Structures are given as C-alpha cells and as structure tokens.
Image (cartoon, grey):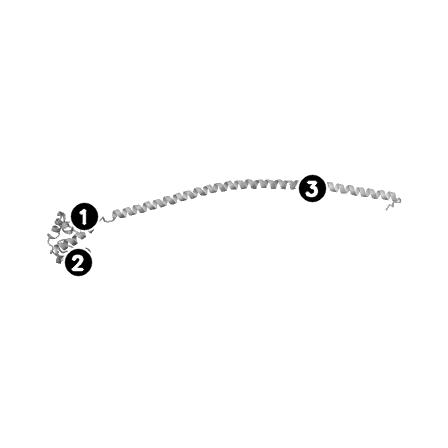
Amino acid sequence: MRYRVRHPEIAAGVALFAIVGMISMAGTSSAAYEPYEIKKEAAAATERQYAELVSDGQVADQRRAESLLSSKLVEGERAAAAAEAERQRKAAAEEASRSAARAAATAAAPKKKTPAAQTSFASSAAWAASPKAIAVAKCESGGNPTVVSRTGKYQGKWQMDDRFWASYGGLAFASDPQYASEAQQDEVAYRGWLARGWQPWSCA
C-alpha cells in the first residue's frame, strides 16, 4: 500500500531527514576509512625510518670498506716488500753460486808455471850458462847441439820438436834445431822459457 503525503511541508521534512541521514551515513563511511589512512601514514613513516637506517648502514659499510681497503693496502705493501726481499735473496744466492762456480773452475784449471822474470838474465847466453839450464841441457841431450832422438821428433841441445822451434822463432835461423848453431838454439829455448818456464822440458 502506498502512502501519499498530503502536506508538502511534511514531504519537505521527510526529504530533509533523508538528506541528513545520507550525510550522516557518509560521515560514518568516512570515519570507517580513517584507520586505513593511519596505517598508510604509519607505513610511510616506517619506510622513512628504514631508509634512514639503510642510509646509516651504508655509511657504516663505507667506513668498514675504507678500513678494509686500508688493511688491504698495508697487506699489499707487506707482500711487495716480502717479494722484493725474496728477489734480492735469490739474486744474492745466484751470484754466490756463480762466484763459487768461477772459483771452482779457476781451481780446476791447470796452473801454468810462472816463468822467471825476464830481468833475471840479461840474455839467452846468460840464461844458458845458469846452473839450472846447464843441468837441464845435459839431461836432455848431454849438451850436444846436433843430437837427434831415436824417433827423430826431438832435436838439438834442448831437444825441441818442430812445433816448439817454429813457435819461438827458430825458423828464422834454420829449418830444424840440429842445423842451427848452439847460440841460436839457446836463443829459441830461452824465448820458450820466458813464455812457459821449465814446463816444456821433462828433465827440469
């Protein structure tokens, strides 16, 4: 059943009541949404605080990184110093080894007899007249300038072979020692003695 409002003022009142009710409902709805807004604001504040914490953490991490970098630099410097010390140690060891090898080679090399000083005798004649030279010549050939060994290899007073004779200027006097004079043989033997000492003669 429908009711018709006969009086317009009553209708207006009803309408006004309805409007007030709607407004009241709208206010209630708005109040219902207030907790969500509060939560949203709280979340935003929390995010800001988190960002600040992160920022502080980054600063802390940066300081920690700088400290770590500093320690790494120190470690690198120490490692470089240790490597340089090791390199120097190896270089010193290698040099010591080379020095030892040179010393061993020098010790193993045959030692040459040091010839007498050239000033010991004024001439080959003075040298040949010395007691030592006389003894050696006598042992080698009996002091005979023309003697030749049974094999023919050694000739003359000093029993010189062809190589010795040629090496110390004997060919300027004769083709073989036995064809040269005694003085010439003494000269060639004296030159050999100056260069090699008594080493060429087995009787020395």
Question: Mark 3: which secondary structure?
Answer: helix
Residue 135 vs residue 65, the one in the foreground: 135
Residue annotated with mark 3: 37
The residue carrying pointer 2 sits among few (fewer than 14), some (14 to 19) or many (20 or more) residues within 10 Å by Cα, namely few
Question: Mark 1: which secondary structure?
Answer: helix
Which dot marks residue 172? 2
Could you give the CA–CA distance between mark 3 and mark 1, rounded to whole angstroms?
Answer: 123 Å
- Percent across and percent down for residue 161 are 16, 56
Q: Say which label, 2 or 1, has the lower sequence index.
A: 1
Residue 119 vs residue 170, the one in the foreground: 119
Residue extending farthest to the bottom is 175
Given the image, on which type of amino acid does mark 2 rest? Ala
Given the image, on which type of amino acid does mark 3 rest? Glu
- Percent across and percent down for residue 62 are 54, 42
- Depth check, mark 3 against mark 1: the one in front is 1
Q: Say which label, 3 or 2, has the lower sequence index.
A: 3
Query: Mark 3 near mark 1, Cβ–Cβ under 8 Å?
Result: no
Given the image, on which type of amino acid does mark 1 rest? Thr
Residue annotated with mark 1: 119
